[in-house]
Image: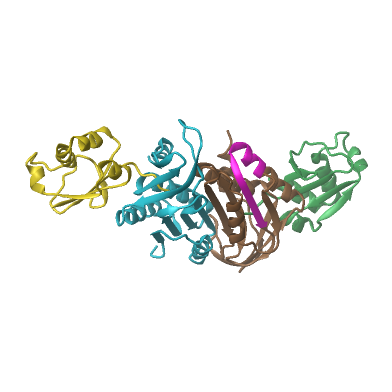
Chain colours: A brown, B cyan, C green, D yellow
Amino acid sequence: MSDDIIVVQEEDFSHTQLYDQLRSYSGQGGAIVTFTGLVRDFHSDENVDRETVSGIFLEYYPGMTESSLKSIVALARERWSLCAVSVVHRVGELQPKDQIVFVGVCSEHRQAAFEASHFIMDYLKTQAPFWKKERRASGDCWVDAKTSDTLAAQRWKG
Amino acid sequence: MSDDIIVVQEEDFSHTQLYDQLRSYSGQGGAIVTFTGLVRDFHSDENVDRETVSGIFLEYYPGMTESSLKSIVALARERWSLCAVSVVHRVGELQPKDQIVFVGVCSEHRQAAFEASHFIMDYLKTQAPFWKKERRASGDCWVDAKTSDTLAAQRWKG
Amino acid sequence: MIKVLFFASLRDKLGVSELAVSIDQLTAISHETSVEVLVKHLSSQNAQWGDILNSDASLLIAINQTMVESNTVIHDGDEVALFPPVTGG
Amino acid sequence: MIKVLFFASLRDKLGVSELAVSIDQLTAISHETSVEVLVKHLSSQNAQWGDILNSDASLLIAINQTMVESNTVIHDGDEVALFPPVTGG
């Protein structure tokens, strides 16, 4: 538990290094699930056509963001038996195709690893103070929160 | 779709290389989920105490195993919109902590990537012809199929 | 003093990222110094701020870096943050 | 001829991994040459095989590398595989 990695940083992260760490902490774990989010090079929502995005800016709330991620991981550990958890989220200016976020979970069984990593991402998307501004062809624009993300997080309740 | 990687091999695989390939094939995909199964160094089921396992032997049905994996990936592609899928499964003699299986999925949204990779693993566990023999302290023993795996696969139906 | 922080689109619209409010400015409005009272105070400073703060029902609130509801009471020395729904990941 | 393959624990118990059966040996038992008839033929070869093949209701069957039910008809030249439930991953 003390080996959990929870980091907010500007620099890119090494997927290899994060995977190797999870594997080395695996203990009795036989299942590792990783999620990686990449910057997409277009914007789309229900109301507008796709538009090219040349980059994004990620803002956060230093202090609160980290403790929010820790709380989310603690919630996951209450629900599932997990050997190791890693969460890395980047902030600042990012380019299309850049890695934004990594969530990795190692557990004894695959069910727990899949569910816990999915849960952490759904909660991160709706609870952790990060805000995304897209550099669109039509100008910079703060991204609106998505109803689908709120619904995704709600389905873990009750 | 032609870029899908579906391989059965004795050699270890490089998690880094498989992840990098998924990322390079990502297209409009913003979400990559990977699952890795590791050889556990103990045996346990409901009926017996934990027992040390010094290694496993993985048998397969050359030809059928590969086509079974292809069918499972095709089923996943019918259900979810996926940019790239990779499945690598090892066979032969493996040591504790060795990587056994890799399933990686890249898709536009995280929901599809999580669900499709989970689906592929659940189907692989119950449909793909692989058989595991454990080198236990008490002697070699073919592993029994688990009811929990059958139930996990069934929950994707109907 | 109460430290008030604004983030992302809210900060851009208000044109300020941080300001200090004396607890007395809140008790002058109501003896129950809730976040709602803070918003009332800020709205009274500037008509445009009032429009911005009251038009968006989805604004989130944190006191001392923990999410709270708008009826939560603020104490002297607290750090209060107002921000739009989050969009990370 | 029909090529019959056994895998894993079933192969170990039977002591054979592959054998050839003539389609005539099946038509001698029944004109409908299903997998059940093949199992009946194999069981008649050896009492121990009979015990092994009939004791395990969970055996899986593939014809030409596709999973089938036990009432599926076998044709001359087919590859039939019998094996226990799979345990990969």
Say if the magenta span includes residue B74. Answer: no
> In this orientation, which residue lies closer to the viewer: C33 or A16?
A16
| For residue A24, side relative to residue C2 (left or right) | left
Q: Compared to C58, does A9 lie above or below?
A: below
| For residue A148, side relative to residue C54 (left or right) | left
Hey, which residue is sitting farthest top in the picture? B47
Q: Residue at x 62, y 62 (%)?
A: A14
Q: List x then y, in percent, for residue C40.
A: 82, 43
Q: Quadrant of residue D31?
A: top left
Hey, which residue is sitting farthest right in the picture? C24
Q: List x then y, in percent, for residue B9.
A: 40, 59
| For residue B22, side relative to residue A134 (left or right) | left
Q: Residue at x 16, y 37 (%)?
A: D40
Say if the magenta span includes residue A85. Answer: yes
> In this orientation, which residue lies closer to the viewer: B58 or A9?
B58
> In this orientation, which residue lies closer to the viewer: D63 or B138?
B138
| For residue A65, side relative to residue D75 (left or right) | right
Q: List x then y, in percent, for residue B63.
A: 30, 57
Q: Report if residue D11 is visible in the image.
A: yes
Q: Count of labels shown?
A: 0
Q: Compared to D14, does A41 lie above or below?
A: below
Q: List x then y, in percent, for residue C47.
A: 81, 51
Q: Report if residue A147 is visible in the image.
A: no
Q: Which residues are magenta?
A: A73-89
Q: Compared to B48, does B89 lie above or below?
A: below
